[in-house]
Amino acid sequence: MLKSQTMKVLAVVVALAAIAIIVPNTNSFLILLATRALAFSILVMSLDILLGYTGLASMGQAAYLGVGAYLTAILASKYQFGLGFDFWIVMLLGVLLGAALAAVFGLLAIRASGVYFLMITLALGQCVWGLAYRWNSLTGGDNGINLRQRPKFGIDLANEVTFFYLVFFCFAVSLLLMYTLVRSPFGRSLTGIRERELRMQILGYNTWLHKYIAFIIAGGFGGLSGVLWAHTAGIVSPENVVLTTSVDALLMAVLGGAGTLVGGVIGTVIVFGLREYLSTLVPWWQYVLGGVYVLTILYLPTGLMGIPERIRQWRGADTEKPAEAKKLAPVTS
Amino acid sequence: MTRILRQRIGPLLLGSAFAIGAVAVSTAKAEELRIGYLAPTTGIFAQVGKDMVDGFKMYLDDHKNKLGGADVKFIVEDTVGKPDTAVTKAKKLILQDKVHMIMGGLLASAGYALAPVSTAEKVVYVNPVAAADDLTQRDFAKYPLHVRTGWSSSQPSHPFGQWACDQGYKKIVAIGADYAFGYEVIGGFQRAFEACGGQIIQKIWPPLGTKDFGPYIPTIKANADAILTLMVGPMSLQFPKQLKSAGNKKPVLGGGTSYDEFVLPAMGDEVVGHVSALQYSAAINTPKNAAFVKSYRTKFGKVPSYYSETNYTTAQMIDEVIKKNNGKFPGAEAFVKQLAAVKVDAVRGPVTLDEMRNPVQNVYIKKVEKKKMHGYTKDELWNTVIKTYPNVNQFGQFKKDEFLKTPVYSRDFPPCKFCN
């Protein structure tokens, strides 16, 4: 058991190293896509903590991406803040703001579960969209806010490769932190809550508090994702907090495999790859995306990360058959 | 065997798609004009996006795929109606396909998103549709490689407001889509209308994409002489129907996109008599337009909208410039300078560009009528031209300097002095 865990960690580390080495040597467009995918996958991983590990399907995570992104954009365009070393302060503020918003929304949402939780988070997400759309003086309404330049602090983030490394660094740190979280006793309790909440309550765990804290942590990471997203895209608009973005994140988490952090990343890469890369090559890319979703739901309900498990099951079934044949043979002769 | 196949097909397809894509390198040929076009080909604005692309393609087909003698490589990318997708695709066109110019963008948000990309990447941005005022007004200096060949949102509204006064309207209620385009069309009308003695007594703003106007229509004030609407996309189709079912008897005025031909064939008798203002109508009674409409209709099965016409005319303008350069692209700055100096006799009438690279052109006041036009034998809905204002620029009857000193039209500007 321990050994397979080490193997898994090693595989992820190797994959990360591969990304860090290969991507900067491809063309600018692929670097841009990779940066976008990595920034968004922080949000998807944060959703995975809620969905895969705590069992809470939230349909309003884009709200935290939104507050992080708008915070960055407003500070950069109106107050010229966050374009030098203070970029790190903006990042911290983004995390705090995302967490604070989650703390407020959590008070309303955590009291519910299942479908009701979904609906409440959806409604709260739409509230944020409504504010982004109508509060013109602050958010620029439908036009959004353009971020004219990227921060410079010793290194110039306007360079695509440098910016890619920054986003990659934040992604790797987020992945590490979230991994530590889900492997910790706290993370284990979350898994317990996902499996059987009543039993956890009987054992004396304060499940409401556990869920609330998980919600806040997810919100914090969402805020971080938003700060990075604002600079990646260069424009923040209400489209970033619209319902479809939250649903996208949910679909990416499920496609890759809920309950495995890395699954979220795989799901993000596939969807982004299809939507933004394949779409430039062929016009029927949506059929491919739809096909991938349908095939995954039909045959891989645990997502693409469930493939190794399925292979093991299939292989395991085969090795049983020859043993049974051997047993029968002596009886007949 | 089949089970594994089924499990693997999805990821396999993906893998091969990636492999093919990553390996495929676009080789740029010399003497070839590469144009990257950004339009929403999927989503709620898909029909509009299609019209935009079809208009440009028709000019290319009529001229053997050459503009000014150069072979054209025309690449269309889908923006899905979102500004950051537009930016990503624009970067792909510039960085990967190495296009000479990017074109397109439908919504004001797309225009405001693409123009900075053009400045940052030093690539020409020819804009046939996105009408956001400030691109050629207060933000003009920020976008030295941006040329607008369509219109600015408030351009038709200025003469329209004057026309409304001439008809004797005194109090008007405005209801328009809640975004920059809506604010600018209605704002321009309000400025002109109130300058000649009229009053806007109420402004209502349903969000872009609203399909149910139930919360908005009952709030329209009863003492208005007329209603001014600005609807875009699917809203244009829904609003007049719902207004009629609510029992409206007041005359209805509209922004150009409210009754444009992209949606007019799908409308019914509820829009007969509605008046709007725009630089194009499919019912313009000139031989040039009649030929354009007939040719477009035969090719694409529908009457051309202003989206089609503006792209056709833009292709015509690019043709003129490249011809002057003997089939070669003269570099970004020279191209922009020459395009800004072009004068064409377009399908919509004579078009030139002002010093801020926005068109100076006719504005047509048009009324929806059911009749036969251009030799067709069936009674259909057409936007009959009832008045033409020639040589209208983006500032209309107002002085440029005073105009630029005031803020851009927004939800709160011009302020609603008579709303109480």
Image: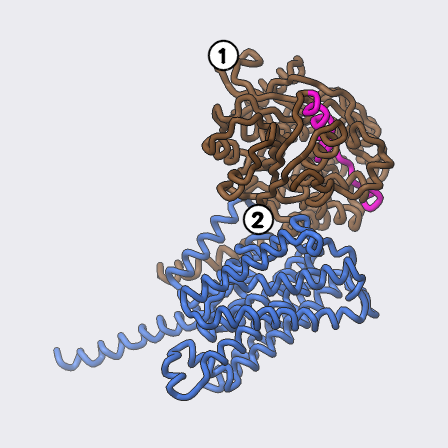
Front-lying residue, B185 or B61: B185
**Disc 2, SS:** helix
Q: For residue A167, which quarter of the picture? A: bottom right
The quadrant the N terminus of chain A occupies is bottom left
Depth order, front residue of A46/A274: A46
In the figure, the blue chain has which letter? A
The amino acid type found where label 2 is placed reads: Ser
Mark 1 is on which residue type? Thr
Check if residue B168 falls in the magenta segment: no
**Mark 1 chain:** B
Query: Can residue B322 be seen here?
Result: no
**Which dot marks residue A215?**
none
| Residue drawn at (46%, 67%) of the image | A57
Rendered image: mark on residue B377: 1
Q: Secondary structure at mark 1?
A: loop
- Specify start and end residues of the magenta stretch as a single range: B140-166
Q: Marks 1/2: CA distance?
A: 42 Å
Q: Quick check: do tags 1 and 2 share a chain? A: no
- The brown-tinted chain is B
Classed neighbour count for the residue bearing mark 2: other residues with Cα under 10 Å, few (<14), some (14–19), many (≥20): some
Chain bearing mark 2: A
Which residue occupies the foreground of this view, B418 or B344?
B418
Position of the C terminus of chain A, as image quadrant, is bottom left
Point 42% across, 88% down: residue: A204
Residue marked by disc 2: A279
> Residue B395's image quarter?
top right
